[in-house]
Amino acid sequence: MWKPDRTAGKPLYRQIYEYLEQGIAYGEWPPGSLLPSERKLAERLGVNRSTVVQAYEELRASGWVESSVGSGTRVARSGWDAAPNWRKYTEGGTILPNLPLMRRIREVARNGDNVIDMANGELSADLFPNEAVADLLQGQRFSEHLGYDDPQGFGPLRKTLVATLLRRLGISATESSVLITSGSQQSLFLITRCLLSPGDAVAVEDPSYCRSLPMFRSAGLRVLPLPVYPDGIEPEDIERLYREHQIRMIFVNPNYQNPTGSVMSAEKRERLLRTAARLRIPIVEDDPFSLTSFGGEPPLPLKASDREGIVLYIGSLSKIAASGLRIGWMIAPRTVIGRLTDARQQMDFGLSVVSQWLAERLLQSEEFGDHLRRLQHSLREKQQKMADALHRHLGRRVSFHLPEGGLNLWCKIDREPDGGKLVEEGIKRGILFLPGSVFGSEPGFVRLSYAKPGLHQIGPGIEAFAHALETL
Ligand SMILES: Cc1ncc(COP(=O)(O)O)c(C=O)c1O
């Protein structure tokens, strides 16, 4: 939420006045609508009530609002030319908004300097390959073409990825079967929008990555749950879903699944590939975490054993290097790559060539291997610290297993508090986390991410979480 800027050199009441005036003029608060009470707005903006009173007085004097005793302050119905009703417009479109709880958490994370963030599945700044990037940028003359790049992705990056994926994950690909995307998120978006149609049924892990669920709903897909067990989903469930609902695609995250951390067993991987091949249903393998593997050697992705070409493989630099580069990739048959490349050209003409150039240099650099080893080591250390703190502050009231990679602990708690209330209690105590409900899970789970907080913040964060839990 917007807040006045105390360093702006403009009186706070004036900033609030202008913020409200613009909202009214743009139709965010239509004529006749009720503005928040002075007390509530003051609380929300973190200012004295008298500051809001002064802003409201100015708005009254300018004719924007009217107040009467007992019925609050309303936007005036006349005296100014009504703007389009922007609020109504924002309810349109085909992309559904995120869940209110997710928006609330995002706002707090964005504004809150005093909050320990265990909600965001993102690396902390010290885990990015900062030095390697600085070295690559320093003194380098950027000599690449600065025009629109190939919408399929920067050629040298596709070539380097082919070599990297083969060397590190056993995946065979050719440059023509690689599409560079703006993170895995864009790969998922393109797949749901270009290869599926509204009304299609898809099988999705339950629980699963919280940001893919609204995307499936926006695309009008029927989402059918595939329960996740400690050794991954059960391929027989796919047979059943196919018979009952004619599912058209399967979405899985076999290595260090988000949120549960589970790793699909080798036997299930084989059966899954066989089942999908027999039923001729494509598998989307979302694999952002393999290279976080603490031991350095993750189980090979499904794609490494995909002889029939049924796996659309998605990867990303977000969890192993830097999410802000927005570099992701998809490996798929050429017909699929062609269709998605055409669509992504309509969306954004392709990714920044500078970012792709940097990613290519980074993957080629000698430092990248060292960076990965340091990252894996730090993540393991942070995970252990979190596990110790959970045992110390919550003992038997919480249970979890320790995945050998990934960024999250999926914790079962000994009761089933309302997820929204628990999050609010956490925010009061300066700790952010995600309740299981946002991943579509049954009550009684939370996902705690150890990647973003500093090592020294993990203990105090878990202590605050334990206090929040005690209140419910
Ligand atoms: C399982 C999974 N898929 C996809 C993404 C999207 O990541 P990005 O678009 O940054 O690559 C995430 C991010 O948290 C994730 O956890």
Image: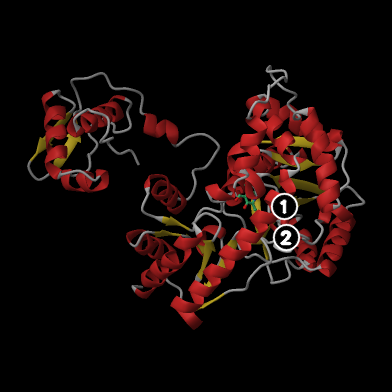
Structural distance between the alpha carbons of marks 2 and 1: 7 Å
Q: Secondary structure at mark 2?
A: loop
* Foreground of the two, 118 or 92: 118
Please state the total of marks drawn on the protein image: 2
| Structural crowding at the residue carrying mark 1, measured as other residues with C-alpha within 10 Å and reported as few (<14), some (14–19) or many (≥20) | many
Left or right of 333: which side holds 390? left
The residue that appears at 54% across and 68% down in the rendered structure is 385
Residue type beneath disc 1? Asp
Q: Quadrant of residue 461?
A: bottom left
Q: Are marks 2 and 1 in contact (CB under 8 Å)?
A: yes
Q: Is residue 262 above or below residue 115?
A: below
Report x, y in % for residue 401: 62, 73
Specify the label residue 255 is tagged with.
Answer: 2
Q: Name the residue at the right extreme.
A: 307
Task: Note whether residue 406 is visible.
Answer: no
In the image, taking residue 327 as reference, residue 279 lies left or right, namely right
Query: As displayed, is residue 62 above or below residue 362?
Result: above
Q: Which residue is mark 1?
A: 287
Residue 237 placement, left or right of 440: right
Q: Position of residue 157 (x, y in %)?
A: 77, 33
Q: Amino acid at mark 2?
A: Asn
Residue 377: give x, y in percent of width and height: 65, 60
Where is the N terminus found, in terms of image quarters? Answer: top left
Report the front residue among 410 and 136. 136
Give the class, few, some or many, for how many residues have Cα within 10 Å of label 2's Cα (few <14, many ≥20).
many
Earlier sequence position, callout 2 versus callout 1: 2
Point 84% across, 69% down: residue: 267
- Residue plotted at (78% across, 47% down): 313
Residue at the extreme left of the image, as rendered = 69
